[in-house]
Amino acid sequence: MSQTTSAASDALAERVDRMIHIGRVGAARPLVAALRRMGLARCRLDLLEAKLALREDRVGDALAGLDRAIGAESADVGLRKCRAEARLRANNIVGAADDAAEAVILDRVDPGNKALLGLVLIEMQRYEDAVACLAEAVANDPGHPSYRLGLAEALLRLGRTAEAEATIDQAAALHPGRVDLRIKAILLRMRQRNFHAALALAQAAKLEGVADAVVFGLLGHAYSSLGQHDLAAEAYREALKLCPEDAYVRHLVAASGAMPGADRAPPDYLRAVFNGYAERFEPHLIALRYRVPGLIRAVIAGEIADRAAPAMLDLGCGTGLVAVTCSDLPLGPITGVDISPLMLAKAREKLVYTELVEADLPQFLETDPRLWPLVTAGDVFCYFGDLATILAKLRARMELDGLLVFSVEELLPDAAGVKQGNGAFALGRLGRYAHAAEHVAAAATAAGFSIEQLRQEDLREESDTPVPGLLVSLRASLHG
């Protein structure tokens, strides 16, 4: 290759790398083919092809190409870093750690190598080591926002919240135009239930002219959490103006009372969310140490020991986790209902359901005339605010003495001792409602149920922090 051609291919390779980084894969793909014809160095071409495959979610192809490339050029830092990312995507944490550590050994000067190793160490739950790596990366490149975000996450995992907040705030101050950093800072305060601080940050962003739907949505959450519902509704309306087609933003506006249907997440929102979530639903919940199916199974096992095998209705069945967990119990036919066709396709693969129905839950309960002796609803009522209506519909479809078992996220007081929302239920930042135990009990009794269990349980973890919930079992009593 001539010197001129080599310089041209190098310049084009840098351009293609930037295009892949910003997601312009359609434009990058033919240019990678052109670089192959131009005779670009093999290891550099392999790296571009692997990055392109990762951008297109072809993780297996990326790993196969990287394995071949590293077999031929084991000392290439770029290939090692890219394979560490690919292995992380494939959930091969140990392999990712090996590659990230090798990248550090090969080039101890580049802070990006230390930062990558720090991020992998977070995944390995080696938080002290992660802090050491990421702090060194920040010291060597103080202006790099991603290094600071990684350091903040490691500090959070160690419970060093004040240091994490300061780290994210420094990143936002260094890059005032980066809206994502402001969002991270606000979210951190929301996660810590420090709603006053979250409100102050969101208000500051608004005053500085940040026009972003997420920022306005978080502003609404902060107002709502502090009981300032009129201001929350106004913030949600501003978010809707910026993103009128977004189903989640419409959900926030509805829940704030600024639109009709404020007592639940709208069906189009739920369908969009869970269709998009179907492929990664189970691995994600497993990673969060999701306990709900096992909790529900334990209740059912204790209640049906001396009964004939009851038919079971699994509301909001998703991919079928509750039914699979209960499949060894002496149950009759199991019917699953869910609004997401892609979730139902995953449930169908489990081969545990006699029938699967695509429907919005209230609509199903209104139109299907069957009576049920056993109904489950694992993490379903978090998409309803006031539970009185949905529980009344359910009671009308249950046999006398029938059993209903469900879970909800628990609404607890904030640091100031105040419960969010109206004190009975509140919409959280992820679009799910949390419910106070008193509200659950009152709604169940009013609907015609007697309460057998209403106890506190951790449902899962988020950022290594337990998510508090309520496990509820109800009997359809005579006055229903």
Image (cartoon, rainbow, N blue to C red):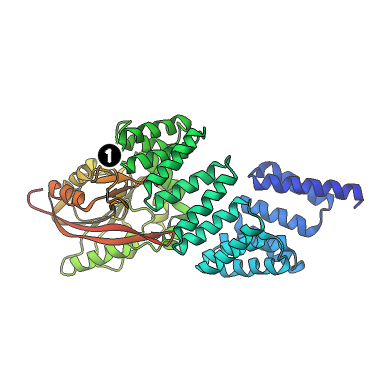
Which sits in the foreground, 265 or 463?
463
Residue 470: image x %, image y %? 26, 57
Side (left or right) of 18 relative to 458: right
Side (left or right) of 14 relative to 154: right
Residue 57: image x %, image y %? 59, 52
Point out the residue furthest to the left here.
479
Is 349 rendered above or below residue 170? below
Point out the residue furthest to the right here.
2
Side (left or right) of 367 relative to 49: left
Q: What's the residue at 76%, 55% (across, down)? A: 45
Point out the residue furthest to the top here.
241
Residue 311: image x %, image y %? 22, 58
Q: What's the residue at 34%, 38% (across, down)? A: 266
Residue 440: image x %, image y %? 20, 50
Would residue 96 be visible to someone looking at this image? Answer: yes
Q: Helix, strand or loop at disc 1?
A: loop
Would residue 352 be visible to someone looking at this image? Answer: no
Is 297 rendered above or below residue 434? below
Is 453 rendered above or below residue 239? below
Q: What's the residue at 36%, 51% (across, down)? A: 193
Residue holding disc 1: 263
Is 363 rendered above or below residue 380? above
